[in-house]
Image (cartoon, grey):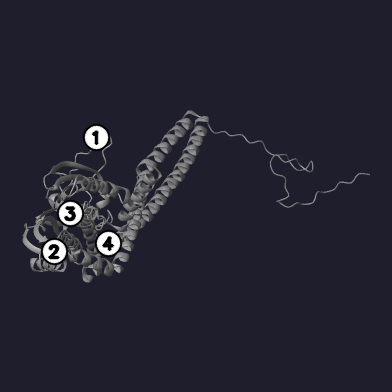
């Protein structure tokens, strides 16, 4: 026997929505919706919607662009600040250097004097040693009657094929008892080159025999006669090292 | 999509492009350029600052060493005084002659000439080397310029004057040699160019030609100026 059951009253929330399948044949199916708006209204609405969305997007974009500008501005301000600090530091350092300028000038002046002295006296010759060498080189019986130095112009070299580099020319006049003593003098002057390289290539330019023999000898003096006393320690050491190397080479030959 | 929507989207796209372009070219880019310029200027300033700091450190070290430099300058001034002071110089020469047992027959010094403009008799060239007037300070290029230009720069770079001296003395050759030695070793040395000696009847006379030098005065740095 069939019984008729009355469906329980359901909550509004439990009611099926439009389009949802009814749980029971008593619940009506969703109503079909139909837009009765004219097409041109629909198009207007769509256009309005698109316009709204576009404006929102443009607003968002404008916001982003403004954010970028503000960010760049802040970064620019920071760089300006850094520049200002760098300039302040530079001006401060410049002030200190300017304050110490008299010290710099003093050292510049001292260096200029040192260099000027070295330049002006680079060709300073120890004439006392040179004269001493000549006096010592005179053999017994030979008297020195004339001695004249000429710095800067070497004598005519007796060896035209391999002239010796010379600093100047020394002209000697002397008297001897005989020609043999003249030869001894020339030999003594020539041997000087073997010892310290001060004199080079003696040459008898004239010899007259009367009751005694009067003769003239010219001999070059080399840069070994330079005093080097006004040079800096480094420059002096460099020249002395060079001389030592040259002497070693001569010894080897 | 309707035609109107397409138009709106097209206009929106154009507006966006204009917005981005104007924001970049008129807002962001000038600021970025300015920032790059500031950074470059700051980097340059920092480089200059570090150079100046090094110069300062160097000058401070020199300031600490000033007594040594002054002693060196005093030595130089003793050999190359700022004024001729002939009385002292003649005393030195006379003393050298007495100690060497030679007799001074004549002394003829010339008035000093500025070595910066003098001609070297050996080379025929100016005694002073050419000076580059564009760089006068030897300490550091960032040091404030202290020297003047042109002729003044040459004079500043070559601050010597020279006086040629001709001495005639009599004595034995060995004594004359000692006298020449003493002349060279004087506290105000004579740089000898030539010695001519003649002996007649056992008596020798010598003509000695040389130079003595004066140096231009140098102002001492004052402590107050350095502390400014």
Q: Which mark identifies residue A160?
A: 1
Rendering quarter of residue A216: top left
Q: Earlier in the sequence, mark 4 or mark 1?
A: 4
Circle 2 — which element?
loop
Query: Mark 4 or 1, which is nearer the eye?
Result: 1
Q: Position of residue A90 (x, y in %)?
A: 31, 59
Q: Position of residue A189 (x, y in %)?
A: 25, 48
Residue lying farthest to the top in this orientation: B3
Give how far apart the Cα atoms at labels 1 and 3 are.
39 Å
Q: Residues within 10 Å of mark 4 (few under 14, many from 20)?
A: many
Q: Chain of mark 1?
A: A
Circle 3 — which element?
loop
Image quarter where the C terminus of chain B lies is bottom left
Q: Residues within 10 Å of mark 3 (few under 14, many from 20)?
A: many
Query: Mark 2 or 4, which is nearer the eye?
Result: 2
Please name whichever residue, A80 or B31, is drawn nearer the observer in this view of the structure: A80
Residue lying farthest to the front in this orientation: A211
Rendering quarter of residue B174: bottom left
Question: Which residue lies at the image location 17% right of the left edge and 43% below the top edge?
Answer: A153
Query: Mark 1 or 2, which is nearer the eye?
Result: 1
Q: Residues within 10 Å of mark 1 (few under 14, many from 20)?
A: few
Residue A222 in view here: no
Give how far apart the Cα atoms at labels 2 and 3 are.
14 Å
Give how far apart the Cα atoms at labels 4 and 1 are.
60 Å
Residue that badge 3 annotates: B158
Residue A123 in view here: yes
Q: Which mark identifies residue B82?
A: 2
């Amino acid at each position: 026997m069939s019984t008729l059951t009355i469906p329980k009253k359901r909550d509004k929330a439990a009611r099926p929505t439009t389009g949802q399948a009814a749980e029971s044949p008593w619940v009506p199916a969703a109503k079909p919706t139909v837009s009765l708006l004219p097409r041109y209204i629909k198009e207007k609405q769509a256009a309005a919607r698109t316009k709204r969305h576009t404006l929102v997007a443009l607003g968002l974009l404008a916001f982003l662009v403004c954010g970028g500008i503000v960010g760049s501005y802040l970064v620019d301000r920071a760089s300006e600040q850094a520049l200002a600090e760098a300039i302040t530091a530079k001006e401060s350092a410049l002030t200190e250097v300017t304050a110490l300028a008299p010290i710099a000038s003093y050292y510049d002046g001292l260096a200029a004097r040192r260099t000027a002295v070295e330049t002006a006296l680079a060709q300073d010759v120890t004439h006392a040693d040179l004269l001493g060498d000549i006096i010592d080189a005179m053999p017994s019986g030979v008297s020195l009657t004339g001695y004249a130095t000429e710095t800067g112009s070497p004598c005519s070299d007796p060896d035209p094929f391999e002239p010796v580099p010379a600093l100047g020319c020394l002209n000697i006049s002397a008297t001897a008892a005989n020609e043999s003593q003249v030869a001894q003098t020339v030999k003594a002057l020539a041997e000087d080159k073997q010892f310290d390289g001060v004199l080079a290539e003696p040459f008898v330019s004239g010899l007259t025999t009367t009751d005694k023999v009067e003769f003239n000898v010219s001999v070059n003096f080399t840069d070994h006669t330079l005093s080097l006393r006004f040079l800096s320690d480094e420059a002096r050491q460099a020249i002395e090292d060079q001389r030592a190397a040259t002497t070693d080479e001569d010894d080897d030959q | 999509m309707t035609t109107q929507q397409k138009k709106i989207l097209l206009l929106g796209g154009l507006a966006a492009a204009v917005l981005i372009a104007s924001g970049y070219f008129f807002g962001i880019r000038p600021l970025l350029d300015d920032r790059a310029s500031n950074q470059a200027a700051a980097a340059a300033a920092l480089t200059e600052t570090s150079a100046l700091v090094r110069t300062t450190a160097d000058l401070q070290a020199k300031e600490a060493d000033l007594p040594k430099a002054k002693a060196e300058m005093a030595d130089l001034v003793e050999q190359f005084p700022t004024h001729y002071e002939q009385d002292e110089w003649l005393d030195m020469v006379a003393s050298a002659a007495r100690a060497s047992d030679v007799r001074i027959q004549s002394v003829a010094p010339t008035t000093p000439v500025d070595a910066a403009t003098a001609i070297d008799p050996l080379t025929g060239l100016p005694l002073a080397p050419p000076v580059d007037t564009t760089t006068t300070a030897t300490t550091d290029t960032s040091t404030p310029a202290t020297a003047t230009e042109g002729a003044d720069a040459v004079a500043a770079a070559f601050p010597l004057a020279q006086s040629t001296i001709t001495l005639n003395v009599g004595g034995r050759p060995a004594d004359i040699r000692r006298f020449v030695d003493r002349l060279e070793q004087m506290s105000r040395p004579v740089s000898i160019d030539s010695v001519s000696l003649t002996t007649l009847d056992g008596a020798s006379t010598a003509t000695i030609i040389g130079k003595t030098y004066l140096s231009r005065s140098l102002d001492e740095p004052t402590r107050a100026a350095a502390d400014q």
